[in-house]
Image (cartoon, rainbow, N blue to C red):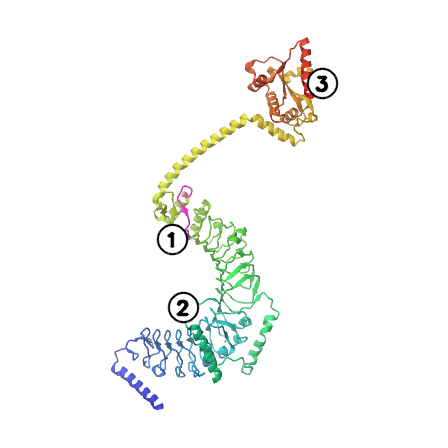
Amino acid sequence: MKFSLVAVTLVNIVLEVFSVLILPSSRSCTSQSSCRCHQSQEHLYADCSNLSLRQSPYFWSNVTRINLSNNLLRELPARSHLPDDLTYLDLSNNAIHRFTNDCFKGLWKLSDLRLNFNKLRVNEYLVDDTFADLINIKNLDLSHNPDLTFQVMPILTSGLQNSSIEVLRLNKIHCTFGLSTEVRINDVRSLKYTNLQELHMSSNRIELIENGALYFLPGTLKRISLADNRLAFGLYILELMELKSLEWLDTSMQHTTHNPVEVVNSIFSYCRNKREQRKIVHENTNALTYKTVNSANISKTDENKIQKTPDMLWGNKTINTIPVPPNMKSFFCNESGLRYRLPSVRLTKNRIENLYCQDNILYAWTGPILGLDSLRILNLSNNFCSKVSKDFFQYVSTVSELYLNDNLLGFSFVQDNDGHIFGNLHRLRHLELKANRISYFHKAVFKNLLNLEYLDLSNNKLTAIDFDIANLKSLRYLDLSVNQIQSLSDNNMNDIDVQAKRLIITLNLFKNPFVCDCKTLPFLTWMIHRHTNRKIRFKSFEQYSCSTSSPSGKIKFVVLEQHLEKLRKDCNSYSTVIFVVSVIICLFFFTVSGGLIYRQRWKLRYFYYMTKSRYHDYKSVKTNNQSDFKYDAFVSYAEEDRPFVEKLISELEAEDRLRLCIHHRDFVPGYNVAENVITAVNKSRKTIVILSPNFVKSDWCKYEIHIAKMEEIYSRADEGVLLLVLYEPVPADEIPLCIMDLIKQKSYIEFPNDEYGDCVFWRKVQETLENEIN
């Protein structure tokens, strides 16, 4: 065995001397002629990738960097084929299925080793010092070796405990399907005193981390990736606070569904069988088994830390306080299946600047969230949230980028009429509210965002810009694409013009239902002019179009200017027609209305004063109850005929036989004359009209006779109310039509003005009134 090893070494030396002496100009660096060699400063780089190699070639001793990726290698390169001064070795994307105990022996200078995307697995002969010689390793990648499992962890970490490891990638070293896994103390305990800065363990079906395991991670650790696992809540969450240097933590994509196409059809049985086989082998050989923590191997300090974990959970901390590593700057929990209402919580002291929680089901944001005093970027998109309280963002005033896309926040913004939701975000520069079913904003919703530069409101249901653009002093980009906006108002256009004078502003109105008609003509003209003058940048302007009533259907904005003049002429003529027709309609309406009012003027006046009189404690007459009448007759006369009325009073009211209503005697002082007339007619059985030349000249007399006629028609059911007394002859051409109609329709009594006839006249008037009483 020793003789064969010496022989192989001598052959390699001979080949190397031959290549150097015989082929000095070939620029070769390996026994494989198809490999590409590059000299860079003091390094010789051998690139043998993508050559479908099944075996590793021999490399000259002066080669320091080797790339054997994307080949068909099934074994690791023989140690004798690799130079001792190797610093970089890439064996990714091959079919390597096992380690050998001497594969890395003597590679003291190797700093970057990539074994990802192979078929590596642990065998029972692998020893603990397999990786021990990699003392200068800084970057080690074993990702995407699903048969490797966490059984490699104790061997790997013990071999690296004295190394310079900085980045360790162990993504997807468990099969895609199968039972969940647990990170145990034995898996990471040897890393405690390394200078590890990044640990990547994504896609390993990790569900739990053993209590105390995180205490064995080195204090230099800055980045941890646990994405695409099956993490459940446990005490290990509290242990994160002990990672004082941790700045970046990725726990996204928890409990996600994997595609079965990723593995062969027999993956289920294969994984189960391998798991059972390895368990048996490890039990028989007493090697590489998962063990619980041996207290003899744990320092006193570490033991105290582990024992304190329950106290941290159930001690003096409030239930709403979330423990966070003190120096953490970025935290990812997107697409992690979180289904909660966000209550008021407080985070322990931290330096979080970037927080990504999108693609969960955080359906209500009550808040407020305390302890995010350094936050710069917050992403809560796609959380099915329909309710955000006005206090939720109250204590995150340092946020400069806020992403709230793909929620249902339209319901909350309709109620925010004072701009309280964003009221405290004075440093906000970038805001996205895409796809939130927002149909309306109150004017003051963004009133405090004086530093906002980017506002995305696309994919909503907005029909207009209702919020005040003038308040957004720093706005540079406004996205209103895919909404229901047909045009902008004059105020909107003026505000945008004012903004464009201060800053170069970009406006995105793509996929809005613009209409080419007279109503939107000012807006279309404004857009064309601003685009032509380049005062405003319209994103995707060449794709804008507007609908028309013409057979062509739509007009592209790039050619719209040619149609504007025609549209303007059509709108002008159309406006003239509308104006003329509107004037004619108004005139017709006023004429007809005036005629109807004039024709029904007495009826309207009657009903007006009758209604008004009811508010003065007067009631209309009821014909079936005679006691409702206060007077037997109301006397309507001209003031010039007052002597005749005085005589009428003395004849009819003698011996209290009749009671007359005389306006100069019985009208209520302080009331409108028209109201008194209405009341007198309504409270009298009859209205006696003293017809004379003076009567037909008096407007008030005409008013009284019209009111009496309305009373007869609308309150007495056509019962006779008027009694005409022809006191003096009136020329026919002076008698108004309304009185002439009464003379023709009703009988009247003529005053004879002689001694005998007067007696007959007074008796007849008296009998007429007394018959009404009886």
In percent of width and height, residue 462 lies at 47, 50
Residue 570 - label: none
Q: Earlier in the sequence, mark 3 or mark 1?
A: 1
Q: Earlier in the sequence, mark 1 or mark 2?
A: 2
Would residue 278 appear left or right of 242 to someone viewing this image?
left
Q: Answer with the quarter of the image where residue 612 lies.
A: top right
Q: Does the magenta run of residues contain 166?
A: no
Residue 540 - label: 1
> Label 3 vs label 1: CA separation?
98 Å
Label 3: which residue?
Answer: 653
Residue contact at pointers 1 and 2, CB within 8 angstroms: no
Up-down relation of residue 532 to residue 575 (above or below) = below
Label 2: which residue?
Answer: 261
Instruction: Look at label 1 and name its amino acid.
Output: Ser
Instruction: Look at label 3 and name its amino acid.
Output: Glu
Provide the residue span drawn in magenta.
504-520
In percent of width and height, residue 610 lies at 62, 29
